[in-house]
Amino acid sequence: MNAEISVVIPVFNGQAHIARAIDSVMEQTLAPAEIIVVNDGSTDDTLDVLQRFGSRLTIVTTPNRGVSRARNAGIKKAKHGLIAFLDADDEWHADKLQKQVDFLADWPQAGFCCCDYTYQDRGMPETTYFTFLARIKAGSPAAWTSNPLLGLVGINFVGTTSTVLAKRDLLNTLGGFDPRYRQAEDYDLWIRCARRAQVAVMPDVLVRKIRHTANLTNNTAETLHFHELVLEEHRQRKTFDACLRGPSELIFALARTRYQIANVCFQHKQYGNCVRYCRKALLTDLSFRNVRLFLYYLSRKLLRLLSFGLVRTQ
C-alpha cells in the first residue's frame, strides 16, 4: 500500500506543548511526507514556535473556529492518501507510524486504524486506555475490530484522535469532523467511518496522552452532554437500521450516558437536574436491563442521601 502520510496537528494557544508534539513526529522511524499544523487563531507565542521549524512544516493559520474546523482545514490541505492526527499536547512513540502502516497492510478494507495509549489522571499512576476499558469490561481490540460500529456505540474505544491513521478518501467522503460538536466531534466521525468501512484496532501502546487543565476533555459534564448529542443524532439517523442488535444497543448506550450525566448533577448537588436525567434515562429505554439499571442508580443515590454523604456512591 502507499505509505505516504500527511500528519495533521491542530493547535490553539499551545506554545507550551506544540514543539514536543512536533518533535515526536519528526523522530518517526517512518517519516511522514508532510506535517500540516493548523494554527487555530492562537493569541500566545504558538506561531513563533512553529516558525522555528522552518520549511519542515506546512503552517495553515485560520481565525479561531474550533478544533473540528482546524482538523478539516488540515484534511483539505493534505496531499497524501493516509492522514495521521496528533493533538498539539500529545506525543507519539517513535515507531507509531511504521507499526500502523504495517498493520493496515493486513486490513485493506479498513478505513482507519487506532491503537492504545498511556495517560495519567488525577494524580493516579500512569495506565493505558485499553487497560481501563478492560477493567470496566468494555471489550477488547479483537472484539472491536470484529464489530466496530457496535463496539463504538458501547464505548469510544478510539479514545483520542492522536491514535488514528485514516484514509483521506474516506474522510473526504464523510465530510470530516462535524463542527457543531464542541466535544465528541471525533466520536461522531468514528461512528460514521465505521458505517462505511472496517476499523483496525491495534493493541500496541504507541501514543502518550498529556492531560492538563487546558484540555477540553477535563470538563466532564460538557463531554457527557456532547456524547449524548452524538448518540441521539445517530438514533435519529437510524444508523443501525440494517443491524439486528444495533438499535437496542444504541438506545441502551444513550440511557447509560444520561445516567452518567445524572451522576455529575448529583455530585454538584444539582438534585433537580439529577432527577430529570434519571427519568429521561429510564424513558429512553424501557427494556428490563435498563429498568434494572435505573433501580441500581436510584438505590445508590438514596443510600448516599440517607447516609448524609458518608457512603461514597455514584
Image: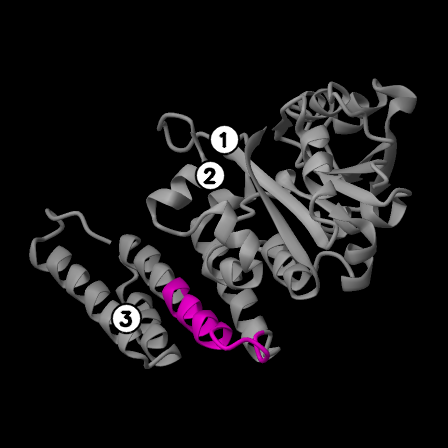
- First in sequence, mark 2 or 3: give its number: 2
Most foreground residue, 49 or 5: 5
- First in sequence, mark 2 or 1: give its number: 1
The chief SS type of the magenta part is helix
Query: Which span is picked out in magenta?
Result: 240-257
For the C terminus, the image quarter is bottom left
Most foreground residue, 242 or 84: 242
171 displayed left or right of 122: right
Q: Which mark is residue 129?
A: 2
Contact between labelled residues 1 and 2, with CB atoms less than 8 Å apart: yes
**What residue sits right under mark 3 in the picture?**
275
Q: Which mark is residue 78?
A: none
204 displayed left or right of 86: left
**What residue sits right under mark 1 in the picture?**
118
Q: Quadrant of residue 74?
A: top right
What crowding class fits label 3: few (fewer than 14 Cα within 10 Å), some (14-19), or many (20 or more)?
some
Q: Nearer the viewer, mark 2 or mark 3?
A: 2
What crowding class fits label 1: few (fewer than 14 Cα within 10 Å), some (14-19), or many (20 or more)?
some
Identified at 56% across, 47% down, the residue is: 158
Measured Cα–Cα span from mark 2 to mark 3: 31 Å
Identified at 13% across, 50% down, the residue is: 309
Identified at 13% across, 58% down, the residue is: 305
Q: Which color mode does the image show?
A: one colour
Q: Residue type at mark 3?
A: Val
Q: List x then y, in percent, for residue 132.
A: 39, 40
Q: List x then y, in percent, for residue 151.
A: 50, 58
Q: Residue type at mark 1?
A: Thr
Element carrying mark 3: helix
Element carrying mark 1: strand
Contact between labelled residues 3 and 2, with CB atoms less than 8 Å apart: no
Identified at 66% across, 43% down, the residue is: 164
